[in-house]
């Protein structure tokens, strides 16, 4: 092998690596955007579910809430924690 071909191979490899990095950066950035959007969507869905649960429980009478073991002041907390709150109460 000639001396120039030996020195050119590492440079060609470095160029390939730079090209790969240029292609990878937008993909990683896109994944970050998609990941953030997914988290926002999940948070929003969870928030809507909590609001629906609060609305449903708030419409119940104090007597019925007492029958199921919930005080009116606990409604939002129970809605946020989901079914775990009722399991932890016993």
Image: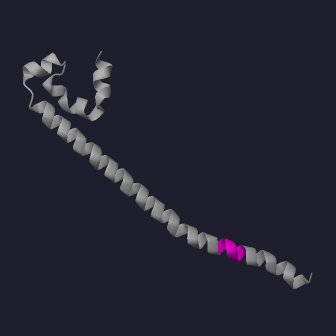
**Residue found at x 22% / y 45%:** 48
Segment tinted magenta in the rendering: 14-18
Question: Which quadrant would the C terminus be assigned to in this image?
Answer: top left
**Residue found at x 28% / y 47%:** 45
**Residue found at x 14% / y 31%:** 57
Would you say residue 58 sits in the magenta stretch? no
Residue, far right = 1
Residue 11, relative to residue 49: is it above or below?
Answer: below
Residue 75, relative to residue 12: is it above or below?
Answer: above
* Direction from residue 36 to residue 1 in the image, left or right: right
Residue 13 locus on image (x, y percent): 74, 74
Question: Which quadrant would the N terminus be assigned to in this image?
Answer: bottom right
**Residue found at x 24% / y 31%:** 77
**Viewer-nearest residue: 14 or 27:** 27
* Direction from residue 46 to residue 60 in the image, left or right: left
Chief secondary structure of the magenta portion: helix
């Amino acid at each position: 092998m000639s001396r120039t071909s030996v020195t050119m191979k590492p440079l060609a490899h470095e160029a390939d690596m730079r090209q790969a990095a240029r292609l990878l950066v937008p993909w990683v950035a896109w994944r970050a955007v998609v990941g953030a959007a997914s988290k926002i969507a999940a948070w929003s869905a969870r928030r809507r579910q909590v609001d629906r649960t609060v609305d449903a429980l708030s419409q119940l009478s104090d007597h019925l809430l007492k029958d199921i073991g919930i005080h009116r002041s606990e409604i939002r907390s129970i809605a946020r924690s989901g079914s775990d709150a009722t399991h932890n109460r016993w």
